[in-house]
Amino acid sequence: MRTTINIEEEKLSRLLQATHQKNKSKAVRLAVEEYLRKERLRKIELLRGGLSFNKKILAGRHHGR
């Protein structure tokens, strides 16, 4: 999909250097993918400690294996 975005030249230059890309589109795609990956990890991290397991049920479930 094509879209037009405005990015300051300095930031775009820094993005190209950070991603080691010569193509602006690839650099922006990488940045977007990285942002979305970090957001997924952040959401997973928020779940840490929020789940609880009953060890007796888990032990019984795997007892016969």
Image: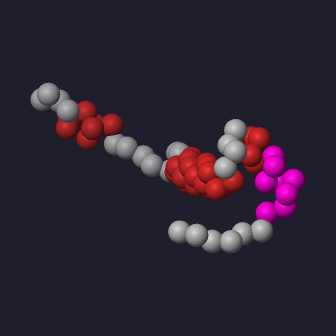
Does residue 9 belong to the magenta stretch? Answer: yes
Total numbered circles: 0
Pick whichever, 1 or 38, lies toward us.
Answer: 1
In the image, farthest residue toward the right: 10
Look at the image and tell me whether residue 35 can be seen. Answer: no
Q: Residue at x 70, y 45 (%)?
A: 22
Q: How is the image coloured?
A: secondary structure
**Residue 9 percent coordinates (x, y):** 85, 57
Look at the image and tell me whether residue 54 can be seen. Answer: yes
Q: Classify 30 as above or below 20.
A: below
Does residue 8 belong to the magenta stretch? Answer: yes
In the image, farthest residue toward the front: 22
- Where does the magenta region start and end? 7-14
Q: Residue at x 62, y 51 (%)?
A: 26
Q: Is residue 1 left or right of residue 17?
A: left
Pick whichever, 42 or 1, lies toward us.
Answer: 1
Q: Residue at x 64, y 56 (%)?
A: 25
Q: Is residue 63 left or right of residue 19?
A: left
Q: Is residue 28 left or right of residue 47?
A: right
**Residue 37 percent coordinates (x, y):** 56, 49
Q: Is residue 60 left or right of residue 39?
A: left
Q: Main secondary structure of the magenta part?
A: helix
| Location of residue 63 (image quadrant) | top left
Pick whichever, 42 or 2, lies toward us.
Answer: 2
Q: Residue at x 33, y 37 (%)?
A: 55
Image quadrant containing the C terminus = top left
